[in-house]
Image (cartoon, helix red, strand yellow):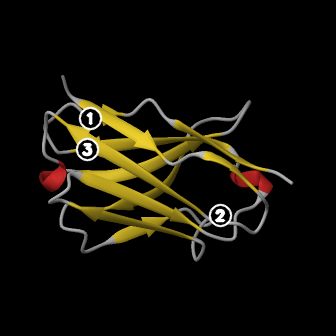
Amino acid sequence: QVQLVESGGGLVQPGGSLGLSCAASEFFISSYAMSWYRQAPGKERELVATITSTGGSTNYADSVNGRFTISRDNAKNTVYLQMNSLKPEDTAVYYCYAKKFGKTPYWGKGTLVTVSS
């Protein structure tokens, strides 16, 4: 069964750091563009960051640019999101997303990140 499983969420103080992982099973992410989305309570899901299949290009939402870093290890079939200088407004459920032209995209079930003192 195809799965994307996020991990690494939790409670962190403002200004702190957290690293998320997304491990894929039953398919290889090496040919997929990978993204992280997030959804805060009462808000729509928004794109946070994207990385191309080779990792040669990344894009970030303005709200996280300079603080978050997306990366991938195709050999480990895993994508990462390093989050630094976290703010309370970063509190959300973070989702992993895999997209390939002509293929059904995949979503993970999400991991909760709470930024609070």
Question: Could you tell me which residue is drawn at 25 percent across and 41 percent down?
Answer: 24
Residue identifier under label 3: 99
Q: Badge 1: few (under 14), some or many (20 or more) residues near its Cα, within 10 Å?
A: few
- Residue 70: percent from left, percent from top: 41, 65
Q: Residues within 10 Å of mark 2 (few under 14, many from 20)?
A: few
Query: How far is the residue under mark 3 from the one under mark 2?
Result: 23 Å
**Kind of residue sitting beneath label 2:** Ser
Drawn side of residue 45 relative to residue 108, left or right: right
Q: Secondary structure at mark 3?
A: strand
Label 3 with label 1: CB-CB less than 8 Å: yes
Residue 43's disc is none
Asked if labels 1 and 2 touch by Cβ distance under 8 angstroms, the answer is no
Q: Secondary structure at mark 1?
A: loop
Separation of disc 2 and disc 1 at Cα? 25 Å
Q: Is residue 62 left or right of residue 86?
A: left
Q: CA distance from mark 3 to mark 1?
A: 5 Å
Mark 1, residue position: 105
Q: Most extreme residue toward the top, as rendered? A: 1
**Residue farthest to the right, as pictured:** 117
Residue 77 in percent (x, y) is at 20, 51
The tag earlier along the polypeptide, 2 or 1, is 2
Residue denoted by label 2 = 63
